[in-house]
Image (cartoon, rainbow, N blue to C red):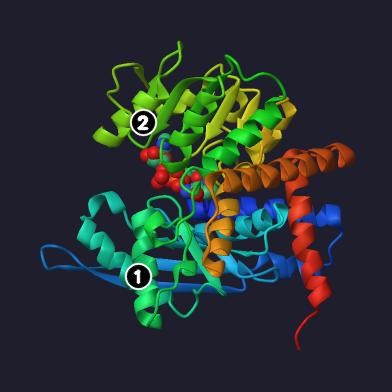
Amino acid sequence: MTVMVPSRTPALITPGQQALESALHQLGQAAEHLGLDDGLRTMLATPRRSLTVSVPVRREDGRMDVVQGFRVQHNVSRGPAKGGIRFHPGTDIHEVTALAMWMTWKCALVGIPYGGAKGGVAVDPTLLTTRELERLTRRYVNEILPLIGPEKDIPAPDVGTDEQTMAWIMDTYSVNAGYSVPGVVTGKPMTLGGSLGRAGATSRGVQIAALAALGRSPEGVTVAVQGFGKVGALAAQYLADSGCKVVAVSDVKGAVHNPGGLDVADLRAYSAENGSVTGYRGADAMAHEDLFELDVDILVPAALEGVLTADNAPRIRARLIVEGANGPTTPEADEILAANGTTVVPDILANAGGVIVSYLEWVQNMQAYSWSSAEVDMKLRDLMEGAYAEVKSMAAERSISLREAAHVIGVGRVAEAHQMRGLYP
Ligand code: NAD
Protein backbone atom coordinates (compact mmCIF):
# COMPACT_ATOMS: atom_id res chain seq x y z
CA MET A 1 0.00 0.00 0.00
CA THR A 2 1.33 3.42 -0.88
CA VAL A 3 1.19 5.95 1.89
CA MET A 4 0.15 9.34 0.57
CA VAL A 5 2.25 12.09 2.08
CA PRO A 6 0.32 15.33 1.76
CA SER A 7 2.43 17.98 0.04
CA ARG A 8 3.27 20.77 2.45
CA THR A 9 1.90 24.17 1.59
CA PRO A 10 4.72 26.64 2.18
CA ALA A 11 3.90 28.60 5.32
CA LEU A 12 2.45 31.98 4.45
CA ILE A 13 4.25 34.60 6.40
CA THR A 14 3.04 38.19 6.64
CA PRO A 15 5.49 41.12 6.52
CA GLY A 16 4.65 41.62 10.20
CA GLN A 17 5.61 38.05 11.08
CA GLN A 18 8.80 38.48 9.06
CA ALA A 19 9.61 41.65 11.02
CA LEU A 20 9.01 39.87 14.33
CA GLU A 21 11.20 36.96 13.25
CA SER A 22 13.98 39.44 12.40
CA ALA A 23 13.61 41.20 15.76
CA LEU A 24 13.70 37.88 17.64
CA HIS A 25 16.72 36.74 15.65
CA GLN A 26 18.58 39.95 16.57
CA LEU A 27 17.58 39.55 20.22
CA GLY A 28 18.79 35.94 20.14
CA GLN A 29 22.20 36.99 18.82
CA ALA A 30 22.57 39.67 21.47
CA ALA A 31 21.44 37.30 24.25
CA GLU A 32 24.07 34.83 23.08
CA HIS A 33 26.82 37.46 23.24
CA LEU A 34 25.64 38.56 26.68
CA GLY A 35 25.22 35.00 28.00
CA LEU A 36 21.67 35.68 29.24
CA ASP A 37 19.81 32.81 30.88
CA ASP A 38 16.72 31.27 29.25
CA GLY A 39 14.24 32.91 31.64
CA LEU A 40 15.52 36.40 30.92
CA ARG A 41 15.66 35.68 27.18
CA THR A 42 12.01 34.66 27.20
CA MET A 43 11.10 37.71 29.28
CA LEU A 44 12.83 39.99 26.75
CA ALA A 45 11.31 38.14 23.78
CA THR A 46 7.72 38.66 24.96
CA PRO A 47 5.84 41.94 25.27
CA ARG A 48 4.59 42.95 28.72
CA ARG A 49 1.22 44.10 27.39
CA SER A 50 -0.53 43.71 24.02
CA LEU A 51 -3.92 45.14 23.27
CA THR A 52 -5.95 44.49 20.11
CA VAL A 53 -9.00 46.66 19.61
CA SER A 54 -11.79 46.98 17.06
CA VAL A 55 -12.25 50.56 15.96
CA PRO A 56 -15.62 51.48 14.43
CA VAL A 57 -15.45 54.46 12.07
CA ARG A 58 -18.43 56.38 10.68
CA ARG A 59 -17.73 57.13 6.98
CA GLU A 60 -18.94 60.30 5.27
CA ASP A 61 -21.69 58.38 3.45
CA GLY A 62 -23.11 57.13 6.77
CA ARG A 63 -21.64 53.60 6.53
CA MET A 64 -19.77 52.18 9.48
CA ASP A 65 -16.43 50.44 8.93
CA VAL A 66 -14.60 48.52 11.63
CA VAL A 67 -10.79 48.34 11.55
CA GLN A 68 -8.28 46.62 13.80
CA GLY A 69 -6.00 48.63 16.07
CA PHE A 70 -3.12 47.60 18.31
CA ARG A 71 -0.95 48.93 21.12
CA VAL A 72 1.95 46.89 22.39
CA GLN A 73 4.18 47.75 25.35
CA HIS A 74 7.20 45.55 24.91
CA ASN A 75 9.14 46.58 28.00
CA VAL A 76 8.77 49.10 30.81
CA SER A 77 11.70 48.19 33.04
CA ARG A 78 13.66 51.41 32.39
CA GLY A 79 10.76 53.88 32.36
CA PRO A 80 7.43 54.57 30.67
CA ALA A 81 6.74 52.88 27.34
CA LYS A 82 7.40 55.03 24.28
CA GLY A 83 6.68 54.52 20.61
CA GLY A 84 4.92 55.73 17.51
CA ILE A 85 1.50 55.00 16.09
CA ARG A 86 1.30 53.72 12.52
CA PHE A 87 -1.70 53.95 10.18
CA HIS A 88 -1.02 51.46 7.40
CA PRO A 89 -3.23 48.80 5.78
CA GLY A 90 -0.58 46.08 6.25
CA THR A 91 0.01 46.57 9.95
CA ASP A 92 -0.73 43.68 12.32
CA ILE A 93 0.01 42.62 15.89
CA HIS A 94 3.27 40.95 14.84
CA GLU A 95 4.63 44.06 13.14
CA VAL A 96 3.61 46.26 16.06
CA THR A 97 5.30 43.84 18.49
CA ALA A 98 8.53 43.89 16.47
CA LEU A 99 8.49 47.68 16.29
CA ALA A 100 7.84 47.91 20.06
CA MET A 101 10.79 45.58 20.74
CA TRP A 102 13.12 47.67 18.58
CA MET A 103 11.96 50.76 20.51
CA THR A 104 13.02 49.12 23.79
CA TRP A 105 16.58 48.51 22.59
CA LYS A 106 16.76 51.93 20.88
CA CYS A 107 15.84 53.86 24.02
CA ALA A 108 18.31 51.85 26.09
CA LEU A 109 21.04 52.25 23.47
CA VAL A 110 20.81 56.06 23.40
CA GLY A 111 20.41 56.20 27.18
CA ILE A 112 16.94 57.70 27.54
CA PRO A 113 14.71 56.47 30.38
CA TYR A 114 11.96 54.79 28.39
CA GLY A 115 10.76 51.32 27.57
CA GLY A 116 9.51 50.42 24.10
CA ALA A 117 5.99 50.50 22.70
CA LYS A 118 4.26 50.82 19.36
CA GLY A 119 0.74 51.26 18.08
CA GLY A 120 -0.95 50.65 14.78
CA VAL A 121 -4.25 50.78 12.97
CA ALA A 122 -4.75 48.59 9.90
CA VAL A 123 -6.08 51.30 7.62
CA ASP A 124 -4.96 53.25 4.56
CA PRO A 125 -5.15 56.89 5.73
CA THR A 126 -4.95 58.17 2.15
CA LEU A 127 -8.42 56.70 1.50
CA LEU A 128 -10.07 58.61 4.37
CA THR A 129 -11.25 62.21 4.54
CA THR A 130 -9.77 64.43 7.25
CA ARG A 131 -12.97 64.14 9.30
CA GLU A 132 -12.97 60.33 8.98
CA LEU A 133 -9.32 60.28 10.06
CA GLU A 134 -10.12 62.43 13.08
CA ARG A 135 -13.00 60.16 14.12
CA LEU A 136 -10.84 57.07 13.61
CA THR A 137 -7.96 58.54 15.65
CA ARG A 138 -10.17 59.63 18.54
CA ARG A 139 -11.99 56.30 18.71
CA TYR A 140 -8.73 54.30 18.53
CA VAL A 141 -7.29 56.45 21.34
CA ASN A 142 -10.42 55.90 23.37
CA GLU A 143 -10.01 52.13 22.97
CA ILE A 144 -6.35 52.17 24.09
CA LEU A 145 -6.93 54.83 26.77
CA PRO A 146 -6.27 52.52 29.75
CA LEU A 147 -2.71 51.95 28.50
CA ILE A 148 -1.49 55.44 27.61
CA GLY A 149 -0.55 58.43 29.75
CA PRO A 150 2.45 60.73 30.28
CA GLU A 151 3.86 58.49 32.99
CA LYS A 152 2.79 55.18 31.40
CA ASP A 153 3.04 55.14 27.63
CA ILE A 154 3.65 58.07 25.30
CA PRO A 155 2.76 57.73 21.58
CA ALA A 156 4.37 59.67 18.71
CA PRO A 157 4.03 59.86 14.91
CA ASP A 158 5.10 57.02 12.63
CA VAL A 159 4.12 55.89 9.11
CA GLY A 160 0.82 57.49 8.06
CA THR A 161 0.44 59.73 11.13
CA ASP A 162 1.63 63.27 11.79
CA GLU A 163 1.41 66.36 14.04
CA GLN A 164 -2.33 66.64 13.44
CA THR A 165 -2.86 63.03 14.57
CA MET A 166 -0.88 63.81 17.75
CA ALA A 167 -3.02 66.93 18.36
CA TRP A 168 -6.22 64.80 18.18
CA ILE A 169 -4.71 62.22 20.53
CA MET A 170 -3.65 64.89 23.01
CA ASP A 171 -7.12 66.45 22.86
CA THR A 172 -8.97 63.13 23.27
CA TYR A 173 -6.81 62.16 26.24
CA SER A 174 -7.11 65.64 27.80
CA VAL A 175 -10.90 65.78 27.42
CA ASN A 176 -11.11 62.45 29.25
CA ALA A 177 -8.72 63.64 31.97
CA GLY A 178 -10.55 66.95 32.39
CA TYR A 179 -7.42 69.07 31.90
CA SER A 180 -4.70 69.56 29.26
CA VAL A 181 -2.06 66.83 29.24
CA PRO A 182 0.52 67.79 26.61
CA GLY A 183 3.00 65.12 27.82
CA VAL A 184 0.76 62.25 26.68
CA VAL A 185 2.16 62.43 23.13
CA THR A 186 5.24 63.80 21.40
CA GLY A 187 5.62 65.10 17.87
CA LYS A 188 2.82 67.62 18.61
CA PRO A 189 2.36 70.95 16.85
CA MET A 190 4.36 73.78 18.51
CA THR A 191 1.18 75.50 19.69
CA LEU A 192 0.29 72.45 21.82
CA GLY A 193 3.70 72.01 23.46
CA GLY A 194 5.67 70.47 20.61
CA SER A 195 9.44 70.84 20.68
CA LEU A 196 11.55 72.88 18.32
CA GLY A 197 13.51 70.44 16.18
CA ARG A 198 11.14 67.44 16.60
CA ALA A 199 9.80 67.46 13.03
CA GLY A 200 13.24 66.97 11.52
CA ALA A 201 14.79 65.05 14.43
CA THR A 202 14.79 61.53 12.97
CA SER A 203 16.25 62.80 9.70
CA ARG A 204 18.82 64.92 11.55
CA GLY A 205 19.86 61.78 13.41
CA VAL A 206 20.13 59.87 10.11
CA GLN A 207 22.38 62.64 8.79
CA ILE A 208 24.57 62.57 11.93
CA ALA A 209 24.88 58.76 11.79
CA ALA A 210 25.57 58.75 8.04
CA LEU A 211 28.32 61.35 8.28
CA ALA A 212 29.90 59.60 11.28
CA ALA A 213 29.94 56.26 9.45
CA LEU A 214 31.16 57.84 6.21
CA GLY A 215 34.29 59.09 7.97
CA ARG A 216 35.28 61.40 5.10
CA SER A 217 34.14 64.63 3.50
CA PRO A 218 30.52 64.31 2.30
CA GLU A 219 31.26 66.58 -0.67
CA GLY A 220 29.96 64.84 -3.82
CA VAL A 221 29.09 61.61 -1.98
CA THR A 222 26.14 60.03 -3.82
CA VAL A 223 22.95 59.05 -2.00
CA ALA A 224 19.72 57.17 -2.82
CA VAL A 225 16.74 57.36 -0.45
CA GLN A 226 13.80 54.94 -0.42
CA GLY A 227 10.69 56.63 1.04
CA PHE A 228 10.05 60.35 0.78
CA GLY A 229 7.89 60.86 3.86
CA LYS A 230 8.66 62.55 7.17
CA VAL A 231 12.00 60.75 7.61
CA GLY A 232 13.19 60.23 4.01
CA ALA A 233 12.50 63.69 2.57
CA LEU A 234 14.32 65.57 5.32
CA ALA A 235 17.14 63.01 5.49
CA ALA A 236 17.66 63.68 1.76
CA GLN A 237 17.54 67.42 2.43
CA TYR A 238 20.03 67.38 5.32
CA LEU A 239 22.44 65.10 3.44
CA ALA A 240 22.22 67.41 0.41
CA ASP A 241 22.82 70.40 2.73
CA SER A 242 25.99 68.62 3.95
CA GLY A 243 27.33 68.47 0.39
CA CYS A 244 26.10 65.01 -0.66
CA LYS A 245 24.57 64.49 -4.10
CA VAL A 246 21.13 62.88 -3.74
CA VAL A 247 20.64 61.09 -7.07
CA ALA A 248 17.45 59.06 -6.50
CA VAL A 249 14.44 58.95 -4.20
CA SER A 250 11.22 56.98 -4.17
CA ASP A 251 7.81 56.88 -2.56
CA VAL A 252 4.99 54.35 -2.66
CA LYS A 253 4.01 55.50 -6.18
CA GLY A 254 7.44 55.29 -7.85
CA ALA A 255 11.05 56.44 -7.99
CA VAL A 256 12.89 59.31 -9.67
CA HIS A 257 16.55 59.45 -10.68
CA ASN A 258 18.94 62.17 -11.76
CA PRO A 259 22.62 61.12 -11.86
CA GLY A 260 23.61 64.81 -11.82
CA GLY A 261 21.89 65.30 -8.43
CA LEU A 262 18.32 66.18 -7.49
CA ASP A 263 17.30 69.63 -6.27
CA VAL A 264 15.92 68.19 -3.02
CA ALA A 265 14.21 71.37 -1.79
CA ASP A 266 12.42 71.74 -5.14
CA LEU A 267 11.47 68.03 -5.15
CA ARG A 268 10.08 68.32 -1.61
CA ALA A 269 7.91 71.24 -2.69
CA TYR A 270 6.78 69.27 -5.78
CA SER A 271 5.98 66.18 -3.70
CA ALA A 272 4.06 68.23 -1.10
CA GLU A 273 1.95 69.74 -3.88
CA ASN A 274 1.40 66.59 -5.96
CA GLY A 275 1.33 63.92 -3.27
CA SER A 276 4.26 62.04 -4.84
CA VAL A 277 7.72 62.45 -6.35
CA THR A 278 6.54 60.75 -9.55
CA GLY A 279 6.25 63.02 -12.58
CA TYR A 280 8.92 65.42 -11.28
CA ARG A 281 10.46 67.13 -14.29
CA GLY A 282 13.99 67.44 -12.90
CA ALA A 283 14.53 63.66 -13.01
CA ASP A 284 13.79 60.45 -14.91
CA ALA A 285 11.27 57.90 -13.74
CA MET A 286 12.74 54.70 -12.35
CA ALA A 287 11.41 51.34 -11.16
CA HIS A 288 11.15 51.03 -7.37
CA GLU A 289 13.47 48.05 -7.11
CA ASP A 290 16.20 49.65 -9.28
CA LEU A 291 16.82 52.31 -6.64
CA PHE A 292 18.38 49.72 -4.34
CA GLU A 293 20.81 48.62 -7.02
CA LEU A 294 22.18 52.02 -7.98
CA ASP A 295 25.90 52.57 -7.82
CA VAL A 296 25.75 55.09 -4.96
CA ASP A 297 27.88 55.62 -1.86
CA ILE A 298 25.01 55.74 0.65
CA LEU A 299 21.63 54.01 0.55
CA VAL A 300 19.00 55.20 3.01
CA PRO A 301 15.93 52.94 3.29
CA ALA A 302 13.29 55.18 4.91
CA ALA A 303 9.97 53.46 4.17
CA LEU A 304 9.00 50.07 5.62
CA GLU A 305 10.43 46.80 6.95
CA GLY A 306 11.87 43.87 5.05
CA VAL A 307 12.85 45.67 1.82
CA LEU A 308 16.50 44.55 1.71
CA THR A 309 16.30 40.78 1.33
CA ALA A 310 18.33 37.76 0.26
CA ASP A 311 16.98 38.43 -3.26
CA ASN A 312 18.25 41.97 -3.77
CA ALA A 313 21.15 42.16 -1.27
CA PRO A 314 23.69 40.54 -3.68
CA ARG A 315 23.01 43.37 -6.17
CA ILE A 316 23.33 46.27 -3.73
CA ARG A 317 26.33 48.38 -4.65
CA ALA A 318 26.18 51.06 -1.93
CA ARG A 319 29.07 50.71 0.52
CA LEU A 320 27.09 52.27 3.35
CA ILE A 321 23.46 51.66 4.31
CA VAL A 322 21.93 53.95 6.91
CA GLU A 323 18.58 52.65 8.14
CA GLY A 324 16.10 55.50 8.46
CA ALA A 325 13.27 52.95 8.52
CA ASN A 326 12.78 50.36 11.25
CA GLY A 327 13.68 46.82 10.24
CA PRO A 328 14.39 47.38 6.52
CA THR A 329 17.05 44.64 6.34
CA THR A 330 16.26 40.96 6.87
CA PRO A 331 18.84 38.83 8.75
CA GLU A 332 19.62 36.95 5.50
CA ALA A 333 20.33 40.24 3.70
CA ASP A 334 22.46 41.36 6.66
CA GLU A 335 24.71 38.33 6.21
CA ILE A 336 25.09 38.91 2.47
CA LEU A 337 25.84 42.60 2.96
CA ALA A 338 28.41 41.84 5.67
CA ALA A 339 30.11 39.29 3.40
CA ASN A 340 30.25 41.93 0.65
CA GLY A 341 31.86 44.45 2.99
CA THR A 342 28.85 46.79 3.15
CA THR A 343 28.53 48.75 6.39
CA VAL A 344 25.00 48.90 7.79
CA VAL A 345 24.21 51.54 10.41
CA PRO A 346 21.28 49.79 12.11
CA ASP A 347 17.84 51.29 12.65
CA ILE A 348 18.00 51.35 16.45
CA LEU A 349 20.99 53.68 16.12
CA ALA A 350 20.45 55.49 12.81
CA ASN A 351 16.83 56.59 13.37
CA ALA A 352 17.09 57.20 17.14
CA GLY A 353 17.05 60.99 16.62
CA GLY A 354 13.24 60.88 16.60
CA VAL A 355 12.84 59.31 20.02
CA ILE A 356 15.67 61.42 21.43
CA VAL A 357 13.88 64.66 20.59
CA SER A 358 10.55 63.09 21.60
CA TYR A 359 12.15 62.54 25.00
CA LEU A 360 13.32 66.17 25.04
CA GLU A 361 9.78 67.28 24.13
CA TRP A 362 8.33 65.20 26.98
CA VAL A 363 10.88 66.59 29.47
CA GLN A 364 9.93 70.13 28.41
CA ASN A 365 6.20 69.26 28.77
CA MET A 366 6.69 67.75 32.23
CA GLN A 367 8.50 70.93 33.32
CA ALA A 368 6.13 73.29 31.44
CA TYR A 369 9.24 74.80 29.90
CA SER A 370 10.75 75.09 26.43
CA TRP A 371 14.26 75.01 25.03
CA SER A 372 15.68 76.81 22.00
CA SER A 373 16.28 74.87 18.80
CA ALA A 374 20.04 75.26 19.35
CA GLU A 375 19.74 73.56 22.78
CA VAL A 376 17.63 70.74 21.34
CA ASP A 377 20.00 70.27 18.41
CA MET A 378 23.04 70.17 20.69
CA LYS A 379 21.49 67.53 22.99
CA LEU A 380 20.41 65.47 19.96
CA ARG A 381 23.90 65.62 18.47
CA ASP A 382 25.54 64.71 21.79
CA LEU A 383 23.34 61.64 22.31
CA MET A 384 23.60 60.46 18.68
CA GLU A 385 27.37 60.90 18.48
CA GLY A 386 27.86 59.30 21.90
CA ALA A 387 25.75 56.27 20.94
CA TYR A 388 27.51 55.95 17.58
CA ALA A 389 30.94 55.98 19.25
CA GLU A 390 29.84 53.35 21.79
CA VAL A 391 28.45 51.06 19.09
CA LYS A 392 31.52 51.47 16.91
CA SER A 393 33.89 50.61 19.74
CA MET A 394 31.77 47.63 20.90
CA ALA A 395 31.75 46.34 17.29
CA ALA A 396 35.54 46.65 17.08
CA GLU A 397 36.11 45.13 20.52
CA ARG A 398 33.99 42.02 19.79
CA SER A 399 34.54 41.86 16.00
CA ILE A 400 30.80 42.02 15.35
CA SER A 401 28.59 44.11 13.07
CA LEU A 402 27.25 47.51 14.10
CA ARG A 403 23.77 45.95 14.39
CA GLU A 404 24.97 43.22 16.73
CA ALA A 405 26.94 45.76 18.77
CA ALA A 406 23.94 48.10 19.04
CA HIS A 407 21.78 45.19 20.22
CA VAL A 408 24.39 43.96 22.68
CA ILE A 409 24.42 47.43 24.29
CA GLY A 410 20.64 47.99 24.17
CA VAL A 411 19.60 44.49 25.24
CA GLY A 412 22.36 44.44 27.85
CA ARG A 413 21.07 47.61 29.52
CA VAL A 414 17.50 46.32 29.65
CA ALA A 415 18.67 42.95 31.02
CA GLU A 416 20.68 44.76 33.68
CA ALA A 417 17.62 46.82 34.67
CA HIS A 418 15.61 43.59 35.08
CA GLN A 419 18.33 42.00 37.16
CA MET A 420 18.65 45.06 39.43
CA ARG A 421 14.89 45.34 39.94
CA GLY A 422 14.43 41.62 40.60
CA LEU A 423 11.26 39.67 39.93
CA TYR A 424 7.98 40.52 41.64
CA PRO A 425 6.62 38.78 43.69
P1 NAD B 1 5.74 58.48 6.39
O1 NAD B 1 4.39 57.90 6.35
O2 NAD B 1 5.89 59.94 6.67
O3 NAD B 1 6.54 58.16 5.05
C1 NAD B 1 6.67 56.88 4.52
C2 NAD B 1 7.19 57.01 3.10
O4 NAD B 1 7.48 55.74 2.57
C3 NAD B 1 6.19 57.67 2.14
O5 NAD B 1 6.89 58.54 1.27
C4 NAD B 1 5.65 56.47 1.36
O6 NAD B 1 5.16 56.86 0.07
C5 NAD B 1 6.92 55.65 1.27
N1 NAD B 1 6.71 54.26 0.90
C6 NAD B 1 5.83 53.37 1.37
N2 NAD B 1 5.95 52.19 0.74
C7 NAD B 1 6.97 52.35 -0.14
C8 NAD B 1 7.60 51.51 -1.09
N3 NAD B 1 7.21 50.24 -1.26
N4 NAD B 1 8.62 52.01 -1.83
C9 NAD B 1 9.03 53.27 -1.68
N5 NAD B 1 8.47 54.11 -0.80
C10 NAD B 1 7.46 53.66 -0.05
O7 NAD B 1 6.56 57.63 7.49
P2 NAD B 1 7.88 58.08 8.27
O8 NAD B 1 7.48 58.64 9.57
O9 NAD B 1 8.78 58.83 7.36
O10 NAD B 1 8.51 56.64 8.60
C11 NAD B 1 9.34 55.95 7.67
C12 NAD B 1 10.13 54.90 8.41
O11 NAD B 1 10.92 55.52 9.43
C13 NAD B 1 9.29 53.83 9.14
O12 NAD B 1 10.00 52.61 9.13
C14 NAD B 1 9.24 54.37 10.56
O13 NAD B 1 8.96 53.36 11.51
C15 NAD B 1 10.64 54.91 10.69
N6 NAD B 1 10.82 55.91 11.76
C16 NAD B 1 10.07 57.04 11.79
C17 NAD B 1 10.28 57.96 12.79
C18 NAD B 1 9.52 59.26 12.85
O14 NAD B 1 9.87 60.09 13.68
N7 NAD B 1 8.54 59.50 12.01
C19 NAD B 1 11.24 57.72 13.77
C20 NAD B 1 12.02 56.57 13.69
C21 NAD B 1 11.80 55.67 12.67
The relative height of residue 293 versus residue 145 in the rendered view (above or below) is above
Looking at the rendered image, the quarter that the C terminus falls into is: bottom right
Q: Residue at x 71, y 66 (%)?
A: 44
- Which residue carries the number 1 mark? 171
Residue 14 visible? The answer is: yes
Relative placement, left or right, of 271 versus 420 is left
Counting from the top left corner in percent of width and height, residue 378 is at: 64, 43
Q: Quadrant of residue 395?
A: top right
Tell me: 394 left or right of 52. Answer: right
Residue 108 lies in quadrant: bottom right
Judged from the image, the secondary structure of the residue bearing numbered disc 1 is helix
- In this view, which residue lies farthest toward the top? 260
Question: Residue 202 occupies which quadrant of the picture?
Answer: top right
Return the residue found at the far left: 61
Q: 62 or 370, which is in the foreground?
A: 370
- Kindly identify which residue carries mark 2: 268
29 in relation to 270, above or below: below
Q: Position of residue 115 (x, y in %)?
A: 64, 65
Which callout, 1 or 2, points to the residue nearer the camera? 1
Is ligand 1 closer than 8 angstroms to the Cβ of mark 2?
A: no
| Residue 62: % across, % down | 11, 68
